[in-house]
Image: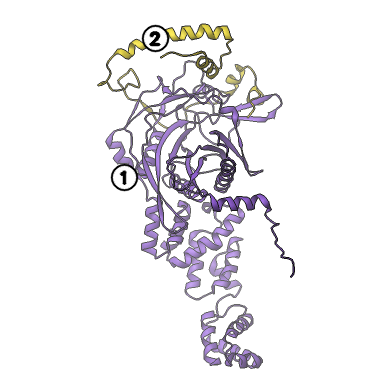
Chain colours: A yellow, B purple
Amino acid sequence: MSLNKEQVKEIAQLAKLSINDSEIEQSTIELNNILSLMAELGKIDTDHVEPMAHPLEMSQRLREDVVSEADLSEEFQAIAPKTGKQHFLVPTVIE
Amino acid sequence: MPPINFKLKPIGIQSYLRIFRGIIMAWETVIGLEIHSQLNTKSKIFSGASTEFGAKPNTQACAVDLGLPGVLPVLNKEAVHMALRFGLAVNAKINQHSIFERKNYFYPDLPKGYQISQFEIPIVGKGAIDISTKEGGTKMVGITRAHLEEDAGKSIHDLYEDYSAIDLNRAGTPLLEIVSEPDMRSAKEAVAYAKKIHALVQYIGICDGNMQEGSFRCDANVSIRKKDTEELGTRTELKNINSFKFLEKAINIEIERQQDILEDGGNVVQETRLYDAVKDETRSMRTKEEANDYKYFPDPDLLPVDIENELLTEIKNSLPELPTEKKNRFVSEFGLSDYDAENLTAQKSLADYYEAMLNDGADAKVSANWVMGELSASLNKNQIDIQDSPISAKELSELVKRINDDTISGKIAKGVFKDMWEGNGRVDDIIQNQGLKQMTDVGAIEGIIDGIIANNSEQVEQFKAGNTKLLGYFVGQVMKATQGKANPKQVNQILNEKLS
């Protein structure tokens, strides 16, 4: 599998990365190198291997449904780049 | 020859064209629903922050909900149990080994840059539910899956100039997303299905069903295809629907829009469309479409969820009587019609109220009429939930009993009901104080009737000549003379005897 420049452009857009045309050229080459390395994995016979969702052979621990968090909004607001009255503020997102 | 006057005015030429095209081209609508049901846990799905509605902005958003570095999600046991309750209630396949995945997208009210959701193996697999159709039958609607996920925060765009304001109190609230098969063929069927799920999640106590507060949200996938074809048309997804009324309207308006496009030779674009209730239209929401690739992958912060058989048995045994079971019991046990039973069991609180009346000894059919009639009308008018009804089930059952034992007529009872609603005392006191007790003294009623017959000789003659419709006139006169306190059954009987 290899990627063309259009696909790399799309991936960059999905990742919200702004890259120019020459960078795309370079990125395409690098990404395809990585993909060819990954392709090595495809040579392994996994027909009888169950898909793995997590490397640890354990189950998720569940917590009781109890409210345990205090209101730390003042501390959190203090480290935010911009806040209004109790809201976090971000540049306008047009719907 | 006079000119032929063809009036085509009131609905406009477009509508006529649409009707005409509808005759020559038959379309079939295909609808599937995605319902986001907010689980009513006390704390969030992956953190110990409160889920209480209406708190001040950001006061219920902890480090986990904000996605601060170094935090780890821990799954809420109750959220898992609630998902299982739903799965078992719709006879779904339960995936006893399910996994959480990251759904990646950028939006300011999603601080981590991904939503923790389930993708490949959701906790609830295929199930089904029956809905009632307009023909009076039932139809099975398939449920594809139901998965657990966290809600995002809220963006408010009109609070500040040049900025969007973010409230993350809702971030991390547990949701069960219930996905249906594309089994519905009309807006009405979609509403019937949504209402059924709405009733069910409240019956099994996993969601408060409040659509205004957003605890129960419906997205509709709508497409149309030529009748008798198999292949599905291109669908659009309708969002921003916060009532059953709007669900029906949004779907119908979208069907019309798609028909117009296809019949003009165009193509429907697969996209998300927002329903605007004020303008009653759907409009494209392109911003989120351009990058529709969520790059799901298993969340390394969460281990797979394993469900033991014992837990499933325990939850199955703890389920209450479900709406359909209750409806069938109301029909067989109380002799109600399908229609009445369906209405009374649509809401658990309504069914509970009704049953409390019967337990108190009130007649089943008369109680059903009062609960669905006067009581529901007054509750709706004043926008009061039945749990907060000013008239308790016991009080209404007393009223019904007074009708059944002929103390008052149904007509007088409506006035008594009004007084009860306004808090003017209990049934028997109101009847006593206002002297509303029905006349049972046959002699007295006969006396009044004799007087009326004597004063209306003309009508009596007409009646005897065969104009039997006049009986109503006489009954009316008697009721007027007795201020409605005569027993109509008795009056009819005596009148018939005296006039024949």
Q: Secondary structure at mark 2?
A: helix
Q: Nearer the viewer, residue B435 or B313?
A: B313
* Quadrant (top left, top right, bottom left, bottom right) of the N terminus of chain B: bottom right
Q: Nearer the viewer, residue B259 or B354?
A: B259
Residue B436: mark:
none
Label 2: how many Cα within 10 Å (few below 14, some 14–19, many 20+): few
Label 1: how many Cα within 10 Å (few below 14, some 14–19, many 20+): few
Three-letter code for the amino acid on which mark 2 is drawn: Ser
Q: Nearer the viewer, residue B66 or B288?
A: B288
Which residue is the site of mark 1?
A: B317
Q: Is residue B376 at least partly visible in the picture?
A: yes
Q: CA distance from mark 1 to mark 2?
A: 54 Å
Three-letter code for the amino acid on which mark 1 is drawn: Asn
Which residue is the site of mark 2?
A: A36
Q: Secondary structure at mark 1?
A: helix
Q: Nearer the viewer, residue B437 or B357?
A: B357
Measured as percent of width and height from the top left, residue B191 is found at 50, 48
The answer to whether marks 1 and 2 sit on the same chain is no
